[in-house]
Image (cartoon, rainbow, N blue to C red):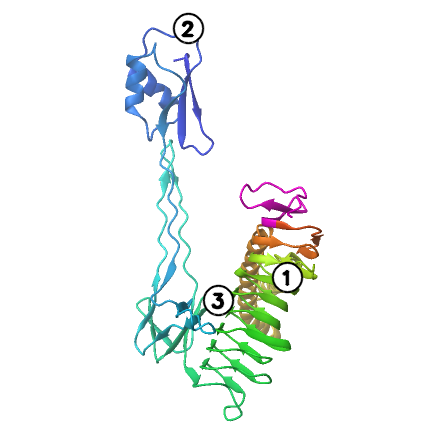
Amino acid sequence: MNDFDLNISKDRLTVYINLINEDKPEIVSESEINELLSSYGVTFGIKKDVIQQIASNLSVTSYPLLIAEGQPPVKGQNGYLKLEVNVEGTKESLTEEVFNLRDIIKIPSVTKGQLVATIFSNTPGVPGKDVHGNEIQAIDGKPYRYRIGKNTIETNSRIYATLDGQVSFLNNNISVQPLFEVQGDLDLKTGNIDFIGNVTIRGNVPSGYTIKAGGDVSIYGLVEAAEIIAGGSIFISGGIVGSNKGRLIAKGDIVASYINQSHIEAGNNLEVSGSILHSHCTTKGNINSLKGSIIGGVISAGKNLQIHNIGNDLHTKTEVFVGKLNEIYEEEKSIQKEIEIARNDLQKLVIIAKKIAEKYKLTSSLSPEEIGFLKRQKVTEGELIDRINDLEEKYRNIQSQINSAFESSLVVSGSLYPNVQLHFGKYQRITNQVFRGVCIKLLNKEITISALSTNQKIEGELVK
């Protein structure tokens, strides 16, 4: 069998047989091929049909041939959560005559005892086997990490509401919030609102009022120069006219018909059906205004932006920040420093405990202070290990955010006007002409503007 050799892949999952002697032998038996495989330690996944093919059709066979194949391991499925109710909220289109309420936000609600979510466990991986017959360990699926929030209870991996209210799902925390509702405009009779749950205003919020809610805030009207702070999301069927005094802050989404001269902070996404005018808007997620324009002000999205128009014919200065790389890098440095400090503290504890243990071996006795230290050391060591694990999880999340930030983009389906300042981290570019239908991204440390239709870079074509 000197006429053949075997090529075993590095992962030991495939074996190819090759004819190395140009003068093919007239006959080769199946047993000779099996002996060759055995000499290489190949015992699993042998393809008998290939052996028969070589033995019977040696002169017409094309080499190399796959003669043995192992069984790769199968990774287990990650655990996941299935929401049994819609927590995103839906829009209900009314008649065209009802302009101010054309986008009514329907907030999801549940009753006591209703199923809110189902948890599905992770599954173990299925081991594989290489061509030598050795088992290849498989990776198990990761369990789904979640927290049971207020007014919910878990039974047999099912989460139920313990009271009537509205579902909130934020940062893998599932809760049901009670509701405070105002039938009409906010006025002196109602006053400012500070409520632990969800708040619904079935009217307008005039200037000067404050609403603070632990959950979502839903307003079926107009918001003037008011302050609204929500632990969940803010839904406004009308617009926001802040007169440079209005301020809306939400840990979740903010949804409105339009925004004018307002300060907006969203922990997740900002959805605006109309325009954003002379406002300061910042989000950790996406900003979408598919039919409106951004004119003036400062707009900052942690991820992506999808806008119809940016700027105007008057070349009003408009600033757009995409990705928030600078903030992410600062957080990365801070977490790295915390991990280093925690590891150093843990190492010091281990060294001291080791010295005390060595002393006990020599003297068979310890002082009360040393005994007390060892007891505290076990508790502190466990706390430090938990802290390091939490910080490392945060660090992995930061790395994911950095990768996402480099993939962030700004899509302008309509017109991108001159005097728009584009920022991607420390990189910036000011437009000096009109572009239409473009995608803006950071590529090789350069802010590029490419056509949406062909995704080819526009080298300064002026749209008249």
Task: Please provide the residue range marked out in magenta.
Answer: 436-464
Residue 153 in picture, x, y percent from top left? 35, 74
Q: Position of residue 415 (x, y in %)?
A: 60, 53
Report the amino acid beneath label 1.
Glu
- The verdict on residue 453 being magenta is yes
Q: Which residue is mark 3?
A: 171
Where disc 1 sits, the SS reads helix
Marks 3 and 2 close (CB-CB < 8 Å): no
- Residue occupying image coordinates x 41% and y 19%: 64
Where is residue 80? Give x, y as percent: 38, 59
Q: Are marks 3 and 1 in contact (CB under 8 Å)?
A: no
Q: Which residue is mark 1?
A: 331
Q: Residue at x 36, y 40 (%)?
A: 128
Which disc number belongs to residue 23? 2
The residue located at (51%, 75%) in the rendering is 231
Image quarter of residue 117: bottom left
> Which comes before the other along the chain, label 1 or label 2?
2
On residue 8, the disc is none
Badge 3: residue crowd in 10 Å (few <14, some 14–19, many ≥20): few
Give the image quarter of residue 161: bottom left
Whichever of callouts 3 and 2 sits on the residue coming sooner in the sequence is 2
Q: How far apart, in angstroms, are the residues tagged by discs 3 and 1?
A: 18 Å
Neighbour tally class for label 1: few under 14, some 14-19, many 20 plus, Cα within 10 Å: some
Mark 3 element type = loop
Left or right of residue 9: residue 364:
right
Q: Give the residue displayed 40% in from the left and 45% down from the top.
A: 138
- Residue depth check, mark 1 versus mark 2: number of the one nearer the observer: 1
Q: Amino acid at mark 2?
A: Asp
